[in-house]
Amino acid sequence: MFKQKIPIVLIYGYPLSIRFFGGLIWIKKIAEYLEKSEAFNVRKVSNGKESKGRIFPRILTIRALLQVFFINPKITILDTYGEAAIWMWILLRLFRPNTKIVTIFHHYEPFFVQRNKGGKLYRKYCGLLDFLTKVMLKNSDSILTVSNASLNELENIVRIRHTQKIVVVGCSNSDDLSVARYEKRDLDFLCVGRFEKFNGIENIWNIIKKKNPTSKFVMIGRVSSKDLLRLRDIGIDHRGIVSDENKVELYGRARVLIFPSLFEGFGMAITEALSARLSIVAWKLPVFEERFEYGTLNNGELVETGNYGLFAQKALLALQEYDKWFERAPVPVQKFNFTKTWNEVGNNVLSVLNKIS
């Protein structure tokens, strides 16, 4: 007898047009896995398009949410990045109280950091979104997260007491970048990701440039027009959002990944860079200490947060030693703690959904 599939709505926290978001890669992979399931019928909703304005994206989001709201899903999976999940959570709790809610938590990152814009009133609005996100997490039927470091943030920052509903389902590598092998590594430093979550990138670069004026530094990822001009003024070649093909090419040409991010639940860019055989210098975040054993950063190092001089020193040292390391480095490069296949991660998520459905 034919068994009807259970309706699920999955809310992306990101516009699908955005690249370089590790969280978006994770959600897309999970969505692909769930769509193959015989038990669930998955409907996907995103934040619409990325836009410089504030009104039009919200109209797109509200329209999309209202469309899926009438599906009356048995389970809704909400990504905690972005506003869409918050509004859907409010609608569901008010009008669909029997719907099971599963939230995805990558890492804690205040909304004003995500937006990096607006005055005092807008920051108060961001504070409200932070508060509602914590309430949403505390009132979820289950929370999916990618690492033990993220689990600790849920306990210590969000203050979730019922930790039995938190499931560390893990994460996998991004697409294999071992193909990014260029004979000529002509870029000294590369940085990949959203500019607003990086700490001290300008200070670090100024120190590097003073000691090695000929260094070449390329950044890619989301950045505001104002920040883009400022970075280019100090000699950073920021290329904005590039295609996947261009990203792979840059990984293949670069020697050292500079990654001074303050907020990470897994660190997809580091995994990609290691696969492409770059040395890594990053802030010493709990998730990196969890994932990477000593000596596994391709001749690079984790640095105590805020020590810009030491960060620059380690980056220059990694650059200086890169050719010697590259000649003796094995291929493929590394295996990481808590790295799974996407099928394993998807199966972990599926197990959670089966339990609450």
Image: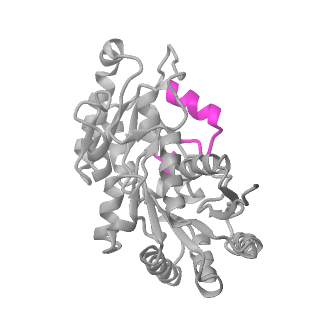
Residue at 48% of width from left, 77% of height from top? 136
Q: Please identify the residue farthest to the front as the structure is shown.
A: 1
Residue at 65% of width from left, 58% of height from top? 15
Q: Considering only vertical position in the picture, is 67 above or below 250?
A: below
- In the image, taking residue 51 as reference, residue 191 lies left or right, namely left
Q: Considering only vertical position in the picture, is 319 above or below 111?
A: above
Q: Considering only vertical position in the picture, is 225 above or below 206?
A: below
**Magenta residues (range):** 230-252
Q: Nearer the viewer, residue 218 or 175?
A: 175
Residue 75, percent from left and from top: 60, 68
- In the image, taking residue 149 as reference, residue 348 lies left or right, namely right
Q: Considering only vertical position in the picture, is 292 above or below 5?
A: above
Q: Nearer the viewer, residue 27 or 38?
A: 38
- In the image, taking residue 257 as reference, residue 95 lies left or right, namely right
Q: Considering the image in quadrants, where does the C terminus appear?
A: bottom right
- In the image, taking residue 68 as reference, residue 288 lies left or right, namely left
Q: Reply yes or no: does residue 308 show up in magenta.
A: no
Q: Considering the image in quadrants, where does the N terminus appear?
A: bottom right
Q: Nearer the viewer, residue 131 or 124?
A: 131
The answer to whether residue 123 of the structure is visible from this angle is yes
Q: Reply yes or no: does residue 242 show up in magenta.
A: yes
Residue 258, percent from left and from top: 38, 40
Rendered image quadrant of residue 154? bottom left
Q: Nearer the viewer, residue 16 or 201?
A: 16
